[in-house]
Image: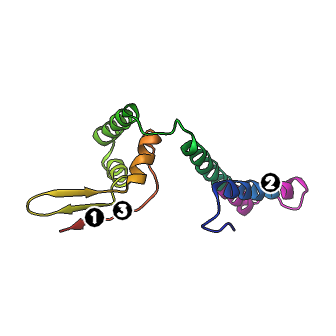
Amino acid sequence: MPSQGTTPRAKLADSQERLSRLYATIESGIADPTDATLKERVATVKTECDIAQITFDRAVAEMRPGARVTEEKIAAFTQVMRTNVLSSDTSFRRAYIRSAIDEVEVDDAEIRIHGRRAVLERLVMGGGATPAGVPSFVWK
């Protein structure tokens, strides 16, 4: 199992290798391809492989000189965010907003919204794709 500090390239290689081993056991007749547990395991490893590929691609894209926040990217993100917040169902809106916001402070005079710059930057660069995370909301 890869450690938390493993690079995106290593995680991708590890998940591809595990998927290859599963396929090899099926092809060699060691594992029964109709086994429900095996099917579930293959699906899980495929998902891990897809996530690792997306993470790797994102890391490579962030290293490119063209991977900079521009006014056009901010405008495009703003439009996607506005559309998703105004036209989606309530649970999706709530989850979408929470993906970008870490904390909301409410007092008698003002409301302060806090979020990490890196998360917002990834959202802008990703065209509005939501990152994983569990934000917190605090009344003050």
Q: CA distance from mark 1 to mark 3?
A: 7 Å
Disc number placed over residue 135 in the picture, else none: 3
Q: Which label belongs to residue 64? A: none
Residue 139 coordinates in the image, percent (x, y): 20, 67
Say which amino acid is labelled 1: Phe
In this rendered view, identify the residue nearer to me: 118 or 105.
Answer: 118
For numbered disc 2, what is the local secondary structure?
Answer: helix
Residue 122 among those drawn in magenta: no
Q: Which residue is mark 1?
A: 137
Position of residue 70 relative to residue 40, above or below, is above
Q: Of circles 3 and 2, which is in front? A: 3
Mark 2 belongs to which amino acid?
Ser
Front residue of this view, candidates 67 and 128: 67
Which of the two discs, 1 and 2, sits closer to the camera?
A: 1
Quarter of the figure that contains the C terminus: bottom left
Determine crowd level at label 1: few under 14, some 14-19, many 20+ residues with C-alpha closer than 10 A. Answer: some
- In-image side of 98 versus 38 (left or right): left
Q: Disc 2 designates what residue?
A: 20
| Marked residue nearer the N-terminal end (3 or 2) | 2
Judged from the image, the secondary structure of the residue bearing numbered disc 1 is: loop
Give the x, y percent position of residue 96: 37, 49
Q: How is the image coloured?
A: rainbow
The amino acid type found where label 3 is placed reads: Pro
Q: Main secondary structure of the magenta part?
A: helix
Residue 20 against residue 88 in the figure, above or below: below
Is the C-beta separation of discs 1 and 3 under 8 Å?
yes
Crowd tier of the residue under label 2, counting other residues whose Cα lies within 10 Å: few below 14, some 14–19, many 20 or above: some
The residue sitting at 57% across, 45% down in the picture is 63
Q: Are marks 1 and 2 in contact (CB under 8 Å)?
A: no
Whether residue 43 appears in magenta in the rendering, the answer is yes
Report, in whole angstroms, how far the alpha carbon at label 1 lies from the one at label 2.
43 Å
State which region is magenta: 23-45
